[in-house]
Image (spheres, rainbow, N blue to C red):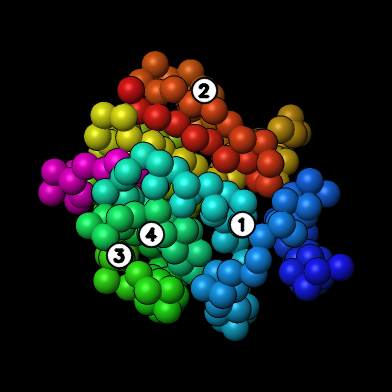
Amino acid sequence: MPEYHFRFFTVKGRLQSMHETTNEEAYAESLYAPDEALEQVKKSIRQLGLQDISVAAGYGRLLTLLVRASRSQHVLEIGAFGGYSGICLARGLDEDGRLISLELKQELANLALANMTHAGFGKRVEYRVGEAIAQLERLSGEARRFDFTFIDADKGNYPVYLEWAIRLSNPGALIVADNTFLRGRTLDPNRNGSSVLQVRHFNEQIATDPRLESTMLPAYDGLAVARVK
Ligand code: MG
């Protein structure tokens, strides 16, 4: 068994509370070599005693591909956490591209910046700390517009974040959102907490909003991918 495969399964127990890894996902992950910068992010998260809720590796690679394929220059991230997705987004940028990342907690913004710096992207990212909605209003006030927005923050505000993302988008911009299945809760008719209801609403909006064309990827914990017309 290749080393990465082995290590993937050793961390599975830790990941199980978030997402039951499928054989297809494990097979896909086993094809890729370990990624030092991303491994460092995961290590730093563990060292702080935090649950690792970074985006799945396969979706991280997709973020890089989508940023690069769309030639996005101005990228917005809502929810930095440890910087895993920030690195993936930044890897898709050309040298003029920049990332603005919104993070509620200063401790996590510091962690993400340290990890982005370790990965060589420290000068390409600006962290803005505090409630995301206030930061989005501020970005709007600065007349900022984005080519790509990645939503991966508190799930109860997903519909609000989608509205802001559309409002702050250049025509043709991409909007991607993680955790659209909420570890299965989105699909479970017996689960009707406010985050679940908001994510269901968000998913329906992604699928039906006439301003968007979109798809929903059902691997890992679900990923919404939309393009603003
Ligand atoms: Mg997530």
Tag in front: 4 or 2: 4
Q: Residue at x 74, y 69 (%)?
A: 4
Q: CA distance from mark 3 to mark 1?
A: 21 Å
Name the residue at the right extreme: 1
- Residue that label 2 marks: 207
Q: Quadrant of the C terminus?
A: top left
Q: Residue at x 13, y 49 (%)?
A: 142
Q: Residue at x 42, y 79 (%)?
A: 118
Q: Please, is residue 79 above or below residue 67 in the view?
A: below
Q: Is residue 185 visible?
A: yes
- Which residue type does callout 1 highlight? Ala
Tag in front: 3 or 2: 3
Q: Earlier in the sequence, mark 3 or mark 2?
A: 3
Mark 4, residues whose alpha carbon is within 10 Å: few (<14), some, or many (≥20)?
Answer: many
The residue nearer to you, when weighing 65 against 192, is 65
- Which residue type does callout 4 highlight? Ala
Label 4 secondary element: helix
- Which residue type does callout 2 highlight? Ala
- Residue that label 3 marks: 125
- For the record, the magenta segment spans 138-149
CB within 8 Å, label 4 to label 2: no
Query: Is 11 on the left or on the right of 129, as rendered?
Result: right
- Residue that label 1 marks: 57
Q: Earlier in the sequence, mark 4 or mark 1?
A: 1
Q: Earlier in the sequence, mark 4 or mark 3?
A: 4
Q: Position of residue 71 (x, y in %)?
A: 32, 43
Q: Quadrant of the N terminus?
A: bottom right
- Is-magenta flag for residue 111? no
Q: Residue at x 19, y 51 (%)?
A: 138
- Is-magenta flag for residue 140? yes
